[in-house]
Image (cartoon, rainbow, N blue to C red):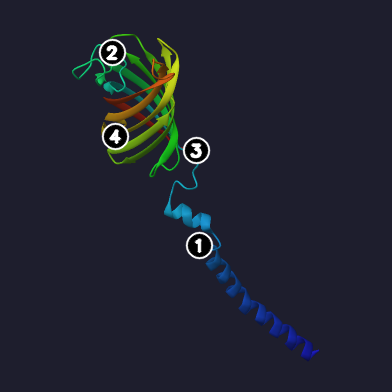
Amino acid sequence: MIRRALLALLGGLALLVAAPRAVHADEVGQGTPEEHPKAERAERDPFATKPGYVQLFATGFVGTGLRFNNPYRLSTPLGSNAESVSRTATYVDLGLAATFGNPLGLQHGLSFRTTAAVEGVGQVITTPSYFAYRRWRSLAAYGRAGIPIVLTPDVTWGFEAGVGGAWYFLGGIGLAGEVVGDIFYGTGTADVGTATYPVLSGQLGLIFSYEAFP
């Protein structure tokens, strides 16, 4: 009996000594990056565990451009003859966009632009685009790549790429500028069946942004 009592007492003491060590090891394990990478990422990047962030944009621009490959059609050549580079009509450009991702990093999304000439022959173009955006305090930079669709006067399409920058002077309201390059497919000439018309444009305007946090 005495032997059994001593063995039971020693077993109880061993459990008491081992229990605090196990609890301590478990607590340490909870804080290790290897076992809990999500907790480490959340501490390093507060937005990593908060999906659902969206930033919305509205833009308005006024611009004009240079049209190359002018087949004797425009009345504003900049050179000495009708084949010279010519100036495009002044236009207004209105757009909406949305981006997703880390608000402190590079964001990706979509934009939709509508462009209309305000002089000369009436022309309306709609352009769905991929949209990338990055902001640093009051400054921002962005880029677009899409397919412009000419609705009037003749339906055609092309490719478009643009880069821009913005300075936010009041919260989500800023001044913005863009350089845009287009290649349009148009009516053929005596030399080619389907002509291409490169256009390089510049535009200035306003940008409005609104951040929706989860």
Q: Secondary structure at mark 3?
A: loop
Q: In the rendered structure, which disc, 2 or 4, sits on the residue that comes first in sequence?
A: 2
Please tell me whether mark 1 or mark 4 is closer to you in this view.
4
Badge 4 amino acid: Gly
Q: Of discs 3 and 4, which sits in the foreground?
A: 4
Which residue matches tag 2?
74
**Residue 33, numbered circle:** 1
Tell me the CA gap for discs 1 and 4: 39 Å
Foreground disc of the pair 1, 2: 2
Tag 2 or tag 3, which sits nearer the N-term?
3
- Please tell me which of labels 1 and 2 falls first in the chain: 1
| 91 is higher (above) or lower (below) than 32 | above
The image shows residue 104 at horizontal and vertical percentages of: 38, 44
Residue 194 visible? The answer is yes
> Could you tell me the amino acid type at mark 1?
Pro
Mark 2 to mark 4: distance in Å? 31 Å
* CB under 8 Å between discs 3 and 4: no
Q: Is residue 36 left or right of residue 161?
A: right
Please name the amino acid that badge 2 sits on: Leu
At 47% across and 48% down in the image, what residue appears?
Answer: 48
Residue displayed at 58% across by 67% down = 26
Residue at mark 3: 52
